[in-house]
Image (cartoon, rainbow, N blue to C red):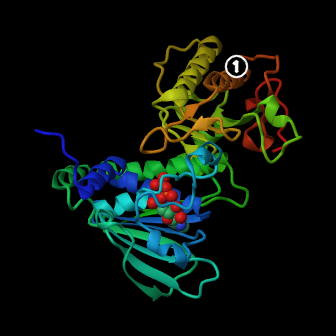
């Protein structure tokens, strides 16, 4: 067969189904749009098969009327102007490609209801499929509060094999959406999140932050008091970050962790998940630096157990939560379609910082690698690492 150009509609469909391959991927994109719009509450509703209907409602800043015609058009975004901006913007915005809504409208029928602050009414519009160029198919004014609701129906209707497979895996789809929300609650404990599965007899899920949100509170609500009581909160501040001369533009790293305490009940911290985020962007722990961090954590924890308890336990996966705050320009976020993989300029320094934190917590190290703090509110005093001082955070 000779080499020929594919029709643009085929190119779009092929690209869209690679970016959004499952209902989970679509919820992730819509949730990230809500977070980028500064929403504090995001409510997700999904049909029992996760394919018939899916909607994400937020109380973010909404979309201005002048921008509506740009919705669902490929490579149309309000979050980035040039590629050069990406390193500095990656820590401030979850999305940057201007592709997600266009992909969604290639794979499903998408309705957006939105109202920006200062506008008297909301607009409800149907997106023209991205294969036909995107933009608005039809619209009408409706009554709705400031914020945005995106509803997608008939997911993957134009891809029968994928739809059939997803129908068979609907329970997996629903549980992966719930896990996604748990990951965002751990990375952003100030967000109010809820998931409702309509007509499935499945119990709704929700997370509501307390007036002073914390990872400990999120852990407690999501996984129960036993896990939260067996973990300790630590903050490691890289010396460069403590340089107060450039408060708007930090140069060093900060690690904020909620980890199993030394001498904790190991059964309470087993198999509850590994939550690593960078600038509050949840990242996959199965690749790159997060994978190395997870491995290092496990070896420090079990190493300490062996010494302290000389138990013969199999090294099961353990709960850990870590958020790394990075200075602008310290990583590339444009690595994978899911935007959950990052490439760091100085990966070894970050790994070193994390290992310093583990040594302090589990190794009884006295020398200071950087500033290590353990807020009293985060755990009982006996779980504080030796040499730690109360946090000012
Ligand atoms: N919930 C929302 N609230 C406010 N604005 C939104 C919302 N969803 C989408 N938008 C607007 O629509 C634009 C396109 O969204 P889309 O998700 O397609 O791209 P993006 O978020 O810019 O980048 P990415 O493809 O990486 O997600 C966004 O840049 C934003 O301006
Ligand atoms: Mg987006």
Q: Is residue 16 above or below residue 380?
A: below
The residue lying furthest to the left in this view is: 1
Q: Residue at x 50, y 31 (%)?
A: 270
Q: Is residue 377 above or below residue 141?
A: above
List x then y, in percent, for residue 77: 51, 60
Left or right: residue 207 versus residue 153 is right
Give whichever of 265, 179 is nearer the camera. Answer: 179
Q: Residue at x 20, y 55 (%)?
A: 159
Give whichever of 356, 304 is nearer the camera. Answer: 356
Question: Mark 1 Cα within 10 Å, few/some/many (few <14, many 20+)?
Answer: many
List x then y, in percent, for residue 251: 77, 36
Q: Which residue is mark 1?
A: 359
Q: Is residue 382 above or below residue 363?
A: below
Left or right: residue 185 versus residue 108 is right
Query: Is residue 219 among what the camera can see?
Result: no
Give whichever of 82, 120 is nearer the camera. Answer: 82
């Amino acid at each position: 067969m000779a080499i020929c150009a594919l029709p643009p509609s085929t190119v779009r469909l092929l690209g869209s189904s690679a970016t959004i391959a499952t209902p989970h991927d679509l919820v992730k994109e819509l949730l990230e749009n809500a977070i980028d719009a500064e929403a504090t509450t995001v409510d997700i509703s999904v049909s029992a098969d996760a394919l018939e209907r899916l909607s994400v409602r937020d109380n973010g800043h909404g979309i201005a009327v002048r921008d509506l015609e740009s919705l669902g058009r490929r490579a149309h975004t309000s979050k980035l102007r040039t590629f050069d901006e990406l390193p500095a913007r990656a820590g401030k915005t979850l999305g940057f490609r201007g592709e997600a809504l266009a992909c969604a409208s290639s794979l499903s029928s998408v309705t957006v209801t939105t109202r920006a602050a200062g506008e008297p009414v909301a607009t409800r519009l149907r997106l023209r499929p991205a294969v036909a160029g995107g933009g608005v198919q039809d619209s009408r004014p409706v009554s709705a509060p400031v914020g945005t609701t995106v509803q997608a129906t008939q997911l993957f209707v134009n891809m029968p094999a994928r739809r059939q497979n997803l129908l068979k895996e609907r329970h997996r789809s629903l549980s992966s959406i719930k896990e996604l929300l748990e990951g965002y609650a751990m990375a952003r404990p100030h967000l109010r999140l809820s998931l409702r599965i309509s007509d499935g007899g499945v119990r709704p899920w929700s997370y509501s932050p307390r007036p002073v949100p914390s990872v400990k509170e999120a852990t407690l609500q999501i996984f129960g008091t036993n896990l939260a009581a067996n973990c300790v909160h630590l903050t490691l501040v890289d010396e460069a970050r403590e340089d107060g001369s450039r408060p708007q533009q930090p140069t060093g790293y900060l690690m904020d962790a909620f980890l199993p305490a030394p001498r904790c009940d190991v059964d309470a911290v087993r198999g509850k998940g590994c939550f690593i985020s960078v600038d509050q962007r949840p990242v996959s722990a199965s690749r790159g630096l997060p994978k190395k961090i997870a491995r290092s954590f496990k070896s420090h924890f079990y190493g300490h157990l062996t010494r302290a308890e000389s138990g013969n336990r199999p090294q099961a996966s353990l709960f850990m939560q870590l958020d790394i705050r990075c200075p602008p320009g310290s990583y590339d976020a444009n690595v994978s379609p899911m935007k959950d993989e990052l490439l760091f300029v100085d990966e070894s320094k970050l790994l070193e910082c994390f290992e310093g934190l583990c040594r302090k917590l589990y190794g009884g190290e006295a020398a200071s690698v950087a500033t290590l703090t353990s807020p009293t509110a985060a755990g009982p005093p006996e779980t504080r690492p030796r040499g730690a001082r109360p946090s000012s955070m």
